[in-house]
Amino acid sequence: MRINHVIADSGYTLTLTFTNGEQRQVDMQPYLHFPVYQPLKNPGFFALAKIDYGTVVWPGNIDIAPETLYADSVPIARPPGGKTL
């Protein structure tokens, strides 16, 4: 499972589009207590999220496995005929 689009939302959530077309949202707050994710507490830094090699990354070699993001995320309901991100 890979990710092909990310939006860093307020409140430390990520809106993700996976390669299978699913749109899901994950709350990153539970991760912020881990030392590697401490920089993400800065909203401006959190907003620098981008996709590289099918997962979400931030500057400074910070990333998180796409499998983890999928497992910890919830589907985003779309109206019938709704478009993906």
Image (tube, rainbow, N blue to C red):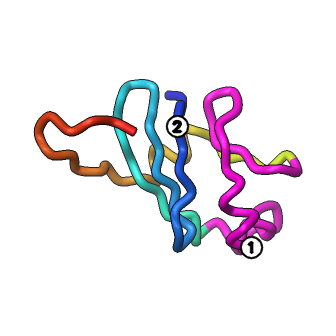
Q: 34 left or right of 66?
A: right
Magenta residues? 31-60
**Are dots 2 and 1 in contact, CB under 8 Å?**
no
Rounded to the nearest angstrom, the CA distance separating label 2 from label 1 is 21 Å
- Residue 42's disc number: 1
Q: 2 left or right of 31?
A: left
Residue receiving disc 2: 5
Q: Quadrant of the C terminus?
A: top left
Please tell me which residue is depicted at 39% across the width and 47% down the height of the picture: 24
The 10 Å Cα crowd at callout 1, few under 14, some 14 to 19, many 20 or more, is few
In this view, which residue lies farthest toward the left?
80
Q: 53 left or right of 69?
A: right
The 10 Å Cα crowd at callout 2, few under 14, some 14 to 19, many 20 or more, is many
The amino acid type, in three-letter code, at marker 1 is: Asn
Q: 24 left or right of 33?
A: left
Q: Position of residue 80 (x, y in %)?
A: 11, 39
The relative height of residue 9 versus residue 64 in the rendered view (above or below) is below
Q: Position of residue 19 (x, y in %)?
A: 45, 25
Sequence-wise, which precedes: disc 2 or disc 1?
2
- Secondary structure under tag 1 reads loop
Please tell me which residue is depicted at 67% across the width and 43% down the height of the picture: 50
